[in-house]
Amino acid sequence: MRSGGKRGAAAAALLCVLAVLLLGACGTQVAGQGGTAPAATAPSWTLSAPTRSQITGAELGTDRRTVTIAVDVPSGPKPCVRDLEAKLTEPVANTVPVQVTFTSPSGDRASGCTRTTTAKARVKLPEPLGDRELAVGYPAAVFTAHDAHLPALRLCGDLGCTPPATGCTADSYEQAVKAVDVPTHTYRDAEHCDGEWLVLDLSWRTGPACGDQTDSACASRLGDRWFYKAGKSGWKPFFRTTEGGCQAVRDRAPAFPTALCASLEPLDPSLHPTYSPTPTASPSS
């Protein structure tokens, strides 16, 4: 009986240990296997400003001082924009600068703010806009009341609110340079113009910035010859080549005047060593 009692006590102790282990296992939760998931972190709201392309319009009030600016802002199933406002900054010359800002969680796609909508912000100028230009944001979208269909202000283009008239002038040549794909610091080496057609020889440095022109690295350049036809909004490029004379351009545009191309010499091969003549768009008015 004594040995049987010991065995019964040992069995009871073992059952107690098993019960404790089972109860402990019941309180253990494996991540991802049931239970309440941890709460997601709310997207943070950050200060933002519309880019130039997101500033879509501006209207001038009847008092000529109140300006309403339309901008594209984030949108989604939940609120995506707070504190939208337009503020005047320091005036510069003949320009009234305005900065538009708002806060949004759109930097985090989990916010759901993946679409856009148009919102408006209003600012009151200390005096009528008059002939001054309204510059919104940076780089600025520039508006003017000149030649505008009020109350909408006119959005100015890359050449400003009063672009130069198409013609044989330095300002008009600068517009022609901007109309083609060349580096920012490009030089006009020669111009041939009759008011309707234009030829520009262009070149740009490719070496380091230095003043020693006897050093071949400092004098290294590339270049192109572009042909243009006058259009309603400026010079329109239609062809480029390194060839001299008239054949190449007149094959492309038979009306191109020989007086502007007959004396053209071929460009130095070093200016465009890998050039393969490829006509671009046909000239149009």
Image (cartoon, rainbow, N blue to C red):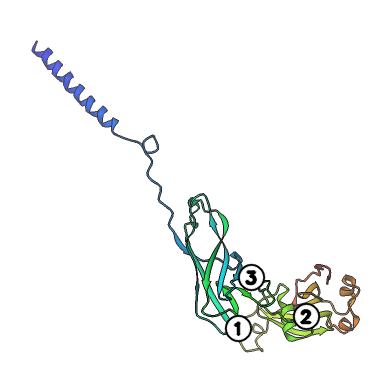
Q: Nearer the viewer, residue 102 or 285?
A: 102
The quarter of the picture where the C terminus appears is bottom right
Q: Is residue 267 visible?
A: no
Give left or right: position of 99 versus 165.
left
Looking at the image, do the residues carrying marks 1 and 2 touch, with CB atoms under 8 Å apart? no
The residue wearing badge 1 is 209
- Residue on which disc 3 sits: 151
Q: Amino acid at mark 2?
A: Thr
Q: Quadrant of residue 30?
A: top left
Q: Amino acid at mark 3?
A: Pro
Callout in the foreground (1, 2): 2
Q: Identify the residue shown where x is 72% and y is 84%.
A: 171
What element does badge 3 sit on?
loop
Q: Position of residue 253 (x, y in %)?
A: 88, 72
Q: Nearer the viewer, residue 14 or 284?
A: 284
Q: Residue 275, how many percent across, how many down?
A: 77, 71
